[in-house]
Image (cartoon, rainbow, N blue to C red):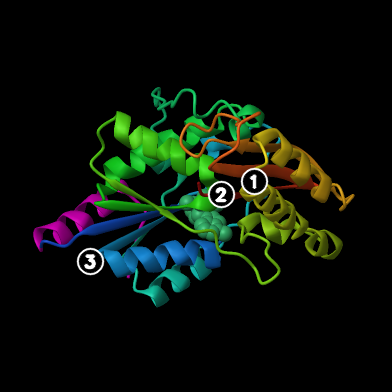
């Protein structure tokens, strides 16, 4: 497995693979790889002849006061995990390599980025779409793999790819969870023992909302159910709880039907997000 630090190394390696007629898959990550990431990696390795994992803690998607400096970084362990799964190339650029000092272009998706996490993290999705667009241009993959745990991110990246005619197929992969239901996340390691014990309540609350939705509850009623169950755990400070249309991400309000129930909540200083989908 090759570890590339520069865009040119990636371009050369991918060009060589392409000249052999190999299909190329990309898994964009910020590293500190866990089972959630690895499920995407395994799928890429399974479905593509040549798999690339990018590991880059992208500063432009962090807001002031967020955890950019504290964000866990462990390239050595990450690279070993990738190698163990049969990944061909890890791309781990520096910030300077990724962003030209005169960089002045931002890729911005409208509408879909305004609610949910976008409402609470101004500029976050511009950072995500800009870096993902750059990674698509550097790697030029046939397929790229994203976790449905970050549902809004998946929908936003899919829209960007469609709108900018980027020839890459976007694959959404199901959320991987710990045994007690907590969605795997690099940020889980910030939780202390007490917070970690409380954390599965978020998924439990979303599941209660999903049950209500299947019994015909409206978006607003579903949100109330989720808030009530989450409220049973006083350590949680909810940031938003929303039942939204799976395609447009607009709140269902007084309608019922297929929905994604998404929530963000703080446990101490740690912000957790999760969602469940209720099919029609
Ligand atoms: P991150 O390193 O947090 O930027 O995540 C990189 C990719 O892994 C994103 O597409 C995430 O949605 C995905 N991911 C993170 N956690 C999980 C999980 N628990 N299950 C599935 N995918 C995940």
Measure the alpha-carbon separation of dots 2 and 3.
Answer: 34 Å
Looking at the rendered image, the disc whose residue lies closer to the viewer, 2 or 3, is 2
In the drawing, does residue 168 fall left or right of residue 277? left
SS at badge 2:
strand
Q: Residue at x 75, y 46 (%)?
A: 226
Q: Is the C-beta separation of discs 2 and 3 under 8 Å?
A: no
Q: Which mark is residue 35?
A: none
Residue 104: percent from left, percent from top: 40, 22
Q: Secondary structure at mark 3?
A: loop
Q: Are marks 2 and 1 in contact (CB under 8 Å)?
A: yes
**Distance between the alpha carbons at the discs numbered 2 and 1:** 7 Å
Helix, strand or loop status at disc 1:
helix
Q: Earlier in the sequence, mark 1 or mark 3?
A: 3
At 55% across and 52% down in the image, what residue appears?
A: 149
Dot 3 crowding, Cα within 10 Å, few <14, some 14–19, many 20+: some
| Residue ranking furthest to the front | 215
Query: Magenta includes 33?
Result: no
* Residue shown at the point (39%, 74%) measured from the top left: 85
Residue position marked by numbered label 1 in the rendering: 213
Q: Quadrant of residue 219?
A: top right
From mark 1 to mark 3, how far is it between C-alphas? Answer: 41 Å
Q: Which residues are magenta?
A: 1-20
Out of 182 and 93, give the one closest to the viewer.
Answer: 182
Q: Circle 3 is placed at which residue position?
A: 49
Q: Which residue is mark 2?
A: 278
């Amino acid at each position: 497995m090759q570890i590339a630090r520069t865009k040119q190394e990636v371009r050369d390696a991918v060009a060589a693979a392409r000249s052999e007629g190999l299909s190329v898959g990309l898994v964009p990550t910020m590293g500190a790889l866990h089972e959630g990431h690895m499920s995407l990696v395994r799928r890429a390795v399974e479905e593509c002849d040549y798999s690339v994992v990018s590991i880059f803690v992208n500063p432009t998607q962090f807001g002031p006061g967020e955890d950019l400096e504290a964000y866990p970084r462990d390239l050595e362990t990450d690279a070993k995990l990738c190698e163990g799964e049969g990944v061909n190339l890890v791309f781990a650029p520096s910030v300077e390599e990724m962003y030209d000092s005169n960089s002045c272009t931002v890729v911005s998706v409208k509408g879909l980025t305004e609610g949910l996490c976008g409402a609470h993290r101004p500029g976050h999705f511009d950072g995500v779409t800009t870096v993902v667009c750059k990674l698509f241009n550097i790697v030029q993959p046939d397929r790229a793999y994203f976790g449905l745990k970050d549902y809004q991110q998946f929908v936003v990246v899919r829209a960007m790819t469609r709108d900018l005619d980027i020839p890459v197929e976007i694959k959404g992969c199901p959320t991987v969870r710990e045994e007690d239901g907590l969605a795997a996340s690099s940020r889980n390691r910030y939780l202390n023992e007490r917070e970690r014990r409380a954390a599965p309540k978020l998924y439990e609350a979303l599941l209660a909302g999903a049950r209500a939705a299947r019994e015909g509850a409206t978006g607003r009623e579903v949100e109330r159910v989720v808030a009530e169950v989450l409220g049973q755990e006083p350590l949680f400070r909810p940031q938003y709880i929303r039942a939204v249309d799976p395609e447009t991400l607009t709140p269902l309000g007084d309608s019922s039907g297929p929905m994604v129930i998404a929530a963000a909540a703080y446990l101490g200083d740690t912000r957790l997000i999760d969602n469940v989908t209720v099919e029609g």
